[in-house]
Amino acid sequence: METIAAKVGVSAAALYRHYAGKYELFRGAVLALSQQLVDCTDLEPVRADPAGTLDRLLDALIDATLDNRDSGGLYRWQARYLRAEDQATLREQLKQVNRRIQKPLMVIRPSLISSQRWMLSPGVLSVIGSIVDHRLRLPADEIRALLVGAASAILAAELPQPGDVFSRPASWRIFAEDAGVYEALLHASMVLFKDRGYSETSMAHIASAAGIPVSGIYRYFSRKCEILATGLRRAADRVSGQLSPVLGALTEPRQALTLLIDAYVATSFANPELAAVYYAERVNLTPADQMLLHNVQLSTIDSWVRLLTAARPSLTPTQARFLVHAAMALVVDLGRMESPANSGAQSAYTQACVRKLMELTLFGAPVIQADAVPRQPPSRRRRGSSSPGRAARR
């Protein structure tokens, strides 16, 4: 609290007059960010123009995210530190925002079932929110255009029906708790870092989860940050290693990217803790480890960007990089909506939807016919209405 007060230019005593402690300040910051999403989507709907309502919602969400780009990561990655009652408040805020997106969408696409709507609206929030996870720079209007295009493509997605998806062979776990003490330590650590947070996880917690005495950890790792660095490096190496067989066997960029999406989704769902730990806890690495991890990730994203610009020559490398980050965010955000108790069939359905939404984010929406459009005399109906929002007019 003293550090925060000094940064603001007030005394700690003055800060305590407004907040009882650091948690109350944290709670206020996180819930204020999510409340901005609620406030900006509190729009008067135009019943005769649901596509126009969706356009306005997208504009409002994008503007709010651009305004909070530097602080939005607090809401996206640190909200797990909220207490149970505040977690419930956050969930209700996000449900309200999702329902506001879904309401006009249901008019445009009445055949969508609930599970599909609850893939599409969080998918929109995910691609928009992805810009807080990186520091790439483009003019604001250019970022808006990219996000509108990706969000509109998602809203137009033709998702599979739950019963039409078949389970695929499970991807390998990167860490296996039954493959020796070293692997058990890495597995236990990454799960604890995800569930408790790095700062709240002690060496005693890790030792207990791995079933060994605390002293046993030091045979393998000298410090906690060394465990974190080892886990994140291995995960980054695994994703990077998926590139070689795909790029070596294929020359057609779109097909290669589709196969990389398949591998990325399968690996991420088999190891759900890794992406969350990467985004939330990489700041706890040493500067040298942060740079090494950044370079490995940069190399992987560079490969995706080269394929995407080859498949879509109209994109600049920076524009393509924005879309690659947005596609990868979908895996994390939609993946963490999935309950650990979900059956194999439910997980297979979620993965199929994520793959489809990633492809649309990267490649754009095909021209498709919306489920329903308001009936108008032929002379007044807009030509080429083919998908919700702006996608209907492009």
Image (spheres, rainbow, N blue to C red):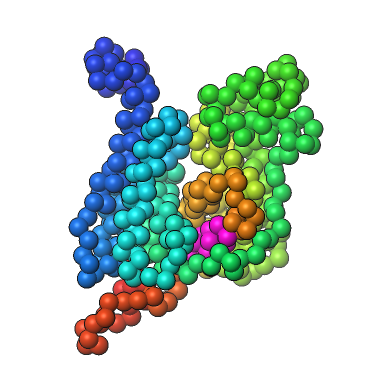
Location of residue 33 by image quarter:
top left
Numbered marks: total: 0
Question: Who is closer to the viewer here, 291 or 331?
Answer: 331
Q: Is residue 357 magenta?
A: yes
Q: Residue at x 77, y 29 (%)?
A: 181
Question: Who is closer to the viewer here, 231 or 114?
Answer: 114
Q: Residue furthest right?
A: 180
Q: Residue furthest bottom?
A: 378
Reply above or below: 84 against 207.
below
Q: Is residue 85 magenta?
A: no
Can the viewer see residue 90 in this picture? yes
Q: Position of residue 281 (x, y in %)?
A: 52, 33
Q: Position of residue 94 (x, y in %)?
A: 37, 46
Q: Position of residue 372 (x, y in %)?
A: 35, 76
Q: Is residue 196 left or right of residue 85?
A: right
Question: Who is closer to the viewer here, 244 or 39?
Answer: 39
Considering the whole magenta stretch, tell me its main secondary structure: helix
Question: Who is closer to the viewer here, 205 or 67?
Answer: 205
* Quadrant of the rendering where the C terminus is positioned: bottom left
Reply above or below: 382 against 211.
below
Q: Position of residue 162 (x, y in %)?
A: 56, 64
Q: Is residue 111 left or right of residue 214?
A: left
Q: Residue at x 62, y 37 (%)?
A: 232
Residue range highlighted in magenta: 349-363
Q: Residue at x 35, y 60 (%)?
A: 102
* Quadrant of the rendering where the N terminus is positioned: top left
Reply above or below: 349 against 336.
below
Can the viewer see residue 310 in this picture? no
Location of residue 208 by image quarter:
top right
Q: Residue at x 35, y 29 (%)?
A: 27
Q: Is residue 302 left or right of residue 9?
A: right
